Image (spheres, rainbow, N blue to C red):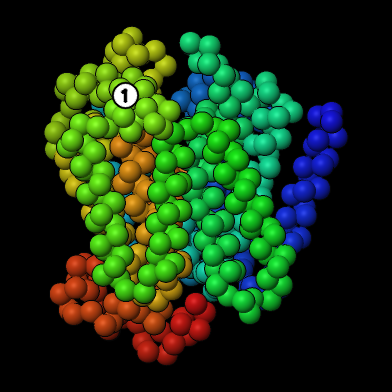
Amino acid sequence: MGSAIAVLVFAAGIGGLFFLDRDDTARTSKFLWLPVIWLWISASRPVSTWFGMGYEAAADAASAGNFLDQSIAGILMILGIIAIILRRKTSIAVLRASWPIVLYFSFCLFSLLFSDSPGWGLKRWVRGLGDLIMALIVVTEAQPVAALRRFFSRSAFILFPASLLLAKYYPSLSRYYTPEGMLLIGGVTTNKNLLGVGTFVLTLGALWQVLSLINNKKQPHRTRHLVAQCTLLFLGMDLLLMAHSATAGACFVLGAALMLAISRIKRPATVHALVLVILLGGGLIELLGVQGGVMNAMGRSSDLTGRTEIWKVLEKMDTNPIVGAGFETFWTGSRMEYMNREFPGINESHNGYLETWLNLGGIGVILIILVLVQGYLIAVAAFRREHLLGGLLIAYVITAVTYNITEAGFRMLGPEWIFIVLAVVAAGRLNAFGNSPLRSMSSRQRKLVLGPYSAILSSEVSQPSRQTEIAKW
């Protein structure tokens, strides 16, 4: 089949997926297309590259301020801010329930006071704020669960088939070689790791929808929805194999296993025990020194494909141990030049915790841990209200913990970070306005989960308002 015919076939297939997954009972606003478009761009490549600009040229232009890409991002963010303002009461309540995310973004901005490249860091921060804006748009919809489903589906319906199309029929746009001559596939992205992470987070979303449809036998037009979501699930798994990204593949297996297990669990205490076993298992692997064998079994060298050598050099770099080099500014100036002499082409540490330390110091690492811990706690609380959705949110948080061991997933403007933020604010929305399981907790437990804003459940949201939101969920 020729490439031109393949484009027509894939376009028809994409149209068929949208047709099969249509749902006339769900009501979502046109604003929902904003986060979908945002993810299309974040999980693929800059728009400018699709208009003939090579990847290297695009990267250079982006560092200087690519007008096309900045304009598109700016328009999406302005429209997103309008949506949030129109839903300001719900948005403020969700932000309060997700206060560690707000605290983290605030500290990122504060850290630029100590940076030697504050202008560059401020641009990155403003752009990174778009991730939070887009997540808020999804969860502040009148029917947020339906919005989540459509966000996952609309994103994957384009990204998955397009990646397969480019990989099979447009190799010059989707394949590249390592310096050692190894062939790698990036699909709609510029490298296999970005393809892997974007695919694994969306494939987990497809799995959640499949499990929900299997569990709800009264869902209207259930069969055609199952066909569409099962197609996405298999396309996603095929892309993960094609990407050959060990970290993304392992995280998908972990997240899927966790979701399947949680779908059979009824008690939060059992969820805690399951997660504890997973974390202790990972700790034992490191403690017993058998991680090399595990890495070899995953198809990766025992030195994590050279990552350990990079970490040794970065750990000796002279940065402020309290606030770091400043948000997203470590990889600039003389530090970038030095690291590229040591490791040509490198622009990240391939470890989310180390990356955070370099840019934001010890305070940044503490705040990231706070985001993960609070995200996990409110995701478990959400599990009490909706166990399948809670299982998905828990999976996103736990896979974020593991993914960032070998990849810098806490960096903004990437699919992994977008879904971490989405998981936290979605759980915050469910707990702030749903038939909140937090209300059954003690005052001390509520303060642990919601921090200084725990009063939102008792004083700032009226009972009629709560009942209205319960009906929406």
Mark yes or no: residue 118 visible.
no
Whether 192 is drawn above or below 10: the answer is: above
- Nearest the camera: 464 or 394? 394
Query: What residue is drawn where x is 63% and y is 26%?
Result: 174
At a point 61% along the width and 32% down the height, the residue shown is 187
Q: Is residue 320 left or right of residue 221?
A: left
Give the residue type at disc 1. Ser
Q: 52 or 83: which is nearer to us?
A: 52
Quarter occupied by residue 96: bottom left
Horizontal and vertical percent position of residue 415? 47, 44
Residue placed under numbered mark 1 in the picture: 302
Residue 317: name its quadrant.
top left
Question: For the image shown, how many numbered marks are present on the structure?
Answer: 1
Secondary element at image label 1: loop
Q: Which quadrant of the structure image shows residue 295?
A: top left
Q: Visible in this render: residue 471? A: yes
**Vertical order, 104 against 259 (above or below):** above
Q: Quick one: quadrant of the N terminus?
A: top right
Decide if residue 209 is on the left or right side of residue 162: left
Residue 60 picture location, percent across and down: 50, 21
Residue in view at x 44 percent, y 87 percent? 467
| Residue 259, above or below 431 | above
Neighbour tally class for label 1: few under 14, some 14-19, many 20 plus, Cα within 10 Å:
some
Residue 368 rendering spot, x and y as whole percentages:
26, 48
Q: Is residue 225 left or right of residue 432?
A: right
What residue do we see at 59% from left, 69% from top? 213
